[in-house]
Amino acid sequence: MSEEKEVEEQSKPLVLEKLEANHADALLAQDESRGTVVVVVRKEQAYAVLEYLKTDPELAYTFLVDVTAVDNSQMESELMQFDYARFMVVYQLYSYHGQCRLRVKVPVHENDLSIPSVTPLWRGANWLERETYDMFGINFEGHPDLRRILMPDDFEGHPLRKDYPLRGRGERERFNFEKQNV
Amino acid sequence: MGLDFVGQGAGETDGNIITTTIDKVVNWGRKNSLWPMPFGTACCAIEMMATLASKFDLSRFGSEAIRFSPRQSDLLIVSGRISIKMMPVLKRIYDQMPDPKWVISMGACASCGGVFDTYTLIQGVDQFIPVDVYIPGCPPRPEDLIDAVIQVQEKITSGASPKGVEAVYE
Amino acid sequence: MQGGLERATGEKMVLNFGPQHPATHGTLRIVLELDGESVLKATPHAGYLHTGFEKLGEHLDYNQYIVVTDRMNYLSPLSNNFGYVLAVEQLLGIEVTKRCQYIRILMAELSRLADHLLWLGTAALDLGAFSVFLYSFREREKLYSIFEKTTGARLTTSYTRVGGVLRDLYDGCEADIQQFVSNFPKALKETHTLLTKNRIWMDRTKGVGPIAADAAVSYGLTGPCLRATGIAHDIRKAEPYSSYDEVTFDVPVGTNGDAYDRYLVRMEEMIQSCGIVTQVLDNIPDGPVNLEDNKITMPDKSDAYGHIEGLIHHFKVVMDGHGVQPPKGDHYCATESPNGELGFYIVSDGSGTAYRIRIRPPSFLHFQALPHMLEGGMVSDTVAVLGSLNVIAGELDR
């Protein structure tokens, strides 16, 4: 049992060790929360780090589980931590090889909402990024088809931002039957 | 029913002549051969499927001929949440159905938005299309849907116009 | 057929499939570009059932949100309830009692049966096998009555609570379930005789909508759709949660990743689930079902109605700022729902309401991979492939 635990403890920081060795300048913060390694990565190097995590044969995070974002505008402590970056784009990765999870977070400032798209790495990223664009307005650069996905095309605003009200801005009462593309 | 049997005495015609009006005969036919158009979107659609399947069997009430083409059906069952992206589709399907047509709003979401008071959900389809029978429940049980179909049948028998027709004359 | 007269015309035709079509199981929409009968391009559209679940999560407290998770994958609400409370509990750093863990496994596996049964019925119905639909609903109704007696509702169960479940199993529940699982394999065999070696079924599904293992990983497929490609990955095995490591079961895999393999994998999963249910029934321990933590679990209903202390306890738990309040931080928790990896990513700011809830739905990624499976095939295969993926609109659009 203790042996197993030792192996586990050694293998967990492997990601961090390798990242520190190869992408030390990209790392803003690192943490291990509830069994999952969490790294915060600078936006400029985000693509390179994710590519490294996927292609490195020892790590092999080949499965992009999820892409989403968090609007931190109403959580002061999180905001301060990364230089008032309003949004945090969150990637969940899984490695079939090592059977472990990894969370990569990338802070994005409100005045520059663009972030490189990871669609060249994972085909599944396409819709996940589209949804994040639809809900938060994050602009994924290099995305082949960045359109709204859940909301109608003529919808205004990004519903999951904190300044968007739960009951909407009256979209559900007034809409044009003629205009909408059925 | 409105169908009266004539002649109580002895004779060849006893009980074999029926007097009625053409409306009543037509309504009697309509009532027993409702062709539902199921507009199933969410959880309620699963209960609607259960209603049609082996245990509850809606065909006992003459409504088993499910038609997914609106032009061949006269009863629209709206079952499930309707989002602002879906509402124009629902409206178009309603418009495509031939008159007279009846609408059942099945479940809380279709009737009033249910637990989802959010930016994207229509808070009751009756804002945009006329509804004849509402079914409460989240989701309603199959028995509730059967009850609603029977209520539509009673409405047809009574000769009342569907809500959609009333709306035109108002 | 392929490359025949239709192809020679060289004209493209655009076919709009959905969002209201009997084979779209709700509100899916695909725009197909056809050359004769073959599909050149398929573009799936989502969002026709977008309900704002994630936004709603920022306004409801942790126990209230369980009601919303029911309505997400409405074929198997108990699995959603389970996955969600597990995420909250891991965020809180608590573990529920052994009996509760076993009850949750029991219910999750029964709902896996319910999900696969409905999938089987509708997928077969789409390809014209109506009797299978009636057979599978006959079995599903038996499950419904077990769910109803246990949770109080047929479909929208809301059975789990943070730190426990709504109530213990009713008297005689074990016998009812035992009876069901002992008869079930026999009932499933009827379907096997109807479909598995049926020429029409095989022609319509074998080699239809194939996807290779590496493409499936790249698209993020999970669950039966991934396992049909030959990857034996199951979260219940890889990261055992809630005592799944104490039951034994096999992970069935396919080889070709086509619609037929997805069918076989799901059929075998049902048998495995029956095995898990039997093991759970044999080993289920006695004891309390809820945690003895008055900050988290609600009092018994008879206490809340009958004693002032119980009433105050109840009031404290449901009052804003006094009930379940996970520490500040975030957590992602994945469970093996019948459709694949169902994940909840919860960000807590320390209050009684989540700061952000993200649901990682399996159907969303499955639906995205649809063009990969359709393009180059025939238009009639669209229905077969879509049916085999089991895309649930409520989970897809949330």
Image (tube, coloured by chain):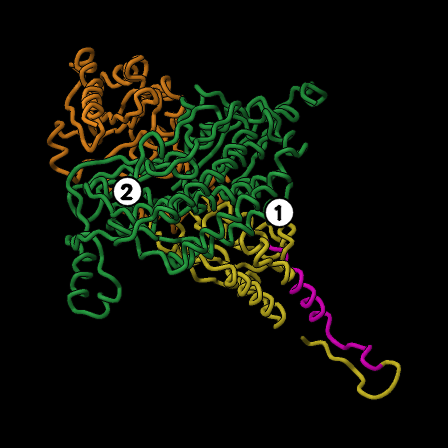
Task: Determine if residue A107 is in view.
Answer: no
Instruction: Please determine whether, in this image, residue C386 is positioned above or below residue B34.
Output: above
Identify which residue is drawn at 21% across, 51% down.
C291
Instruction: Please determine whether, in this image, residue B159 is positioned above or below residue C181.
Output: below
Mark 2 belongs to chain: C
| Residue B34 placement (x, y as % from top left) | 63, 59
Task: Determine if residue A149 is in view.
Answer: yes
Quarter holding residue C326:
top left
Which residue range is magenta in the image?
B14-36
* Magenta segment includes B27: yes
Q: Please identify, in this view, whether the residue under mark 1 or under mark 2 is nearer the observer.
A: 2
Q: Are marks 1 and 2 in contact (CB under 8 Å)?
A: no
Q: What element does badge 2 sit on? A: helix
Q: Which chain is green?
A: C
Between C177 and C48, the one nearer to me in the picture: C177
Q: Which chain is yellow?
A: B
Quarter holding residue C48:
top left
Residue A146: mark: none
Q: Quick one: label 1, few (<14), some, or many (20+) residues within 10 Å?
A: some
Q: Which residue is mark 1?
A: B69
Q: Which residue, as the protein is rendered here, is positioned at the far top?
A: A22
Name the residue type under label 2.
Answer: Leu
Between B73 and C68, the one nearer to me in the picture: C68
| Residue C193 placement (x, y as % from top left) | 63, 39
Q: Colour of chain A?
A: orange
